[in-house]
């Protein structure tokens, strides 16, 4: 299977995984086991599969967050709730969110088929070497209900791809903050103000990194990507696609196309729900690159 097509498939399904970071049902379950609302629920829920790791491990794997922001929540989160309880709460929240957003679809034949296809891809991941976030999630037990099987499979695929993306960014010589700035400048990520606040970077830290990127001739004086900057981002995305292609090759083009087709109305439902405020994202958000 062509690596670029595999990447398009992965990105097209991202919404069905990432809704878990915005759904109030997930936040409710996580605060219900003792976590503080807000950033702590995100950091703890996503990293809990790795166990009670320190702030440094979370910062390294999440990559583009200010380490100080993470240190405000981790490892204190583990004193409020054990990682195993957090994982279980996350899945309860995803269950409730899917039922709220999709209704009876969760028990439909289409959902069962989509879950089976996604599971084939996730189970085709060749190994966990160099993929710490994926490795933690790969050790979790698979759920039983189809909509949770789908979310679990997409989570495995997303974290496997994300670990490879970090490797691609390091190959390109982009720090976590530089990666965030160039992604924002491309218009396919967060708006600048939201990216700064969500990832915990001060205006001065952001401006210093922008200056470095200008010195490298990756950004122009307006803060937009130069030709070299666009080319470097393309290299990063191409390498990310290549490093994440193996499980989609296992599923095959026909299986991937069928999964995209099944998921499209669900993606539309999530988009139209208002769960993801459009004002937070750049003008090219949702485009392939």
Image (tube, grey):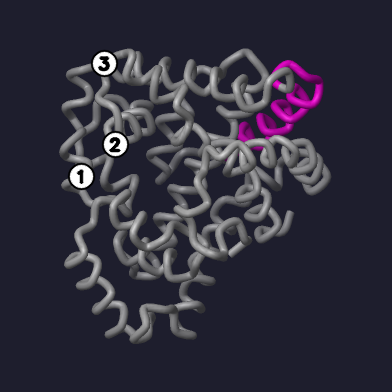
Asked whether 124 falls inside the magenta stretch, the response is yes
Q: Is residue 75 left or right of residue 258?
A: left
Q: Which residue is mark 1?
A: 69
Residue placed under numbered mark 2 in the picture: 39
The picture quadrant where one finds residue 252 is top right
Decide: marks 2, 1 in contact (CB < 8 A)?
A: yes
Q: Position of residue 214 (x, y in %)?
A: 30, 83
Dividing the picture into quarters, in which one does residue 243 lie? bottom right
Mark 3 surroundings: few (<14), some (14-19) or many (≥20) residues within 10 A: some
Above or below 152: residue 72:
below
Q: Residues within 10 Å of mark 2 (few under 14, many from 20)?
A: some
Q: Nearer the viewer, residue 151 or 19?
A: 19
Mark 2 or 3 closer to N-term? 3
Residue at image position (58%, 58%) is 242
* Mark with earlier residue (3, 1): 3
Q: Is residue 75 left or right of residue 223?
A: left
Q: Secondary structure at mark 1?
A: helix
Residue at disc 3, secondary structure? loop
Where residue 50 appears, x then y in whole percent?
34, 29
In the picture, measured across the screen, residue 163 lies left or right of residue 193, that is right
User: Looking at the image, which is closer to me, 199 or 62?
Assistant: 199
Who's the residue at 16% across and 47% down the image?
68
Residue 265, image quadrant? top right
Helix, strand or loop at label 2? It is helix
Q: CA distance from mark 2 to mark 3?
A: 14 Å
What residue range appears in magenta? 106-125
Image coordinates of residue 79 in percent, x first then y, are: 17, 19
Q: Which residue is mark 3?
A: 34
């Amino acid at each position: 299977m062509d690596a670029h097509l595999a990447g398009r498939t992965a990105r097209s399904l991202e919404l069905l995984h990432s809704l878990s970071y915005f759904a109030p049902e997930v936040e409710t379950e996580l605060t219900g086991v003792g976590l503080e609302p807000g950033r702590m629920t995100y950091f703890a829920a996503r990293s809990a599969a790795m166990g009670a790791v320190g702030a440094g491990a979370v910062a390294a794997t999440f990559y583009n967050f200010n380490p100080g922001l993470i240190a405000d929540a981790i490892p204190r989160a583990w004193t409020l709730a054990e990682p195993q309880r957090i994982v279980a709460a996350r899945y309860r929240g995803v269950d409730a969110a899917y039922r709220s957003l999709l209704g009876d679809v969760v028990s439909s034949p289409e959902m069962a088929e989509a879950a089976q296809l996604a599971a084939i891809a996730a189970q085709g991941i060749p190994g966990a070497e160099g993929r710490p976030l994926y490795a933690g999630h790969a050790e979790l037990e698979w759920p039983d209900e189809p909509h949770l099987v789908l979310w679990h499979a997409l989570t495995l695929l997303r974290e496997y791809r994300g670990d490879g993306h970090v490797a691609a960014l390091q190959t390109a010589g982009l720090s976590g903050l530089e990666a965030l700035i160039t992604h924002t400048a491309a218009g396919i990520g967060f708006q600048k103000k939201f990216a700064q606040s969500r990832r915990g970077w001060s205006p001065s830290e952001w401006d210093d990194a922008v200056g470095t990127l200008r010195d490298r001739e990756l950004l122009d004086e307006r803060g937009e990507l130069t030709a070299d900057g666009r080319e470097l981002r393309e290299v990063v995305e191409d390498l990310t696609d290549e490093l994440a292609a193996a499980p989609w090759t296992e599923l095959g083009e026909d299986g991937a196309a069928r999964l995209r087709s099944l998921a499209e109305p669900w993606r539309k439902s999530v988009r139209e729900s208002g769960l993801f405020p459009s004002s937070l994202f750049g003008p090219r958000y949702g485009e392939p690159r």
